[in-house]
Image: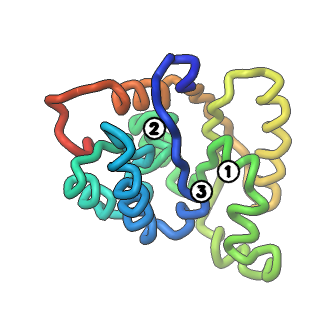
Amino acid sequence: MAAAEGWPLDVHPLPPLLHNRPERIAGEVEGLASRLAAAYDRVVVGYADCGTYGALDEVCARLGLTRLPGLHCYDVFAGPETVEAVLEAEPGSYLLTDFLVRSFARTVEQELGLDRHPELLDDYFRHYTRVVWLAQSEDPAELAELRPLAQDAADRLGLPLHVVPTGVGGLALALRRLVSPQPEEAPCPL
């Protein structure tokens, strides 16, 4: 997306499995941002709060960084109103992104130990009533590839699958706001 938009930026990713340990996100972001500060005029954070309960905002404020808006990536992809509506309609909705659909076995089953202890499935998921895939891809071929994976993830949890097409417009807008120079912008927008 950065190349298509012509944004002159470098991406320095952190491990995606940090989302399974959100208490570590702020420290990892702080370490990476501190290392990058000497090499770049501006460093921004491609995370929403992601379960840090404000710890990431504290790091952003201390280091003068801005981050993606929202409580989690679901807000970035679908918009907070859509996520709120999905959860209000059915509070027991388990949300998946395209990334989680592709990596379900690794990021969910293995990380939760379900591959070794399937008896824990009910302990983890008994209160969920459906799987909601927030489908970012707009490419029909990619959607056709991801749909069976999403269905498989829902089947593994014993839940029905509901698909909410989100596209990447929300992400594109959030990234555009994040990387555009905005001198008047307050650090760490919520």
Asked if residue 44 lies left or right of residue 97, the reply is: left
* Disc assigned to residue 34: none
* Residue 140 shows in this picture: yes
Residue 100 screen position, x and y as percent? 67, 50
Foreground residue among 65 and 131: 65
Mark 3 or mark 2: which comes first in sequence?
3
Q: Nearer the viewer, mark 1 or mark 3?
A: 3
Mark 2 or mark 1: which comes first in sequence?
2
Q: Quadrant of residue 184?
A: top left
> Which residue carries the number 1 mark?
100
Foreground residue among 71 and 93: 71
Number of numbered markers: 3
The amino acid type found where label 1 is placed reads Leu
Residue 79 screen position, x and y as percent? 43, 34
Between the C-alphas of marks 1 and 3, the distance is 10 Å
Foreground residue among 142 and 180: 180
Asked if residue 44 lies left or right of residue 185, the reply is: right
Mark 1 or mark 3: which comes first in sequence?
3
* Disc assigned to residue 16: 3
Between the C-alphas of marks 3 and 2, the distance is 16 Å
x 42%, y 24%: residue: 173
Label 2: element kind: helix
The amino acid type found where label 3 is placed reads Pro
The amino acid type found where label 2 is placed reads Val
> Which residue carries the number 2 mark?
76
Label 1: element kind: helix
Asked if residue 7 lies left or right of residue 98, the reply is: left
Q: Quadrant of residue 182?
A: top left
Label 3: element kind: helix
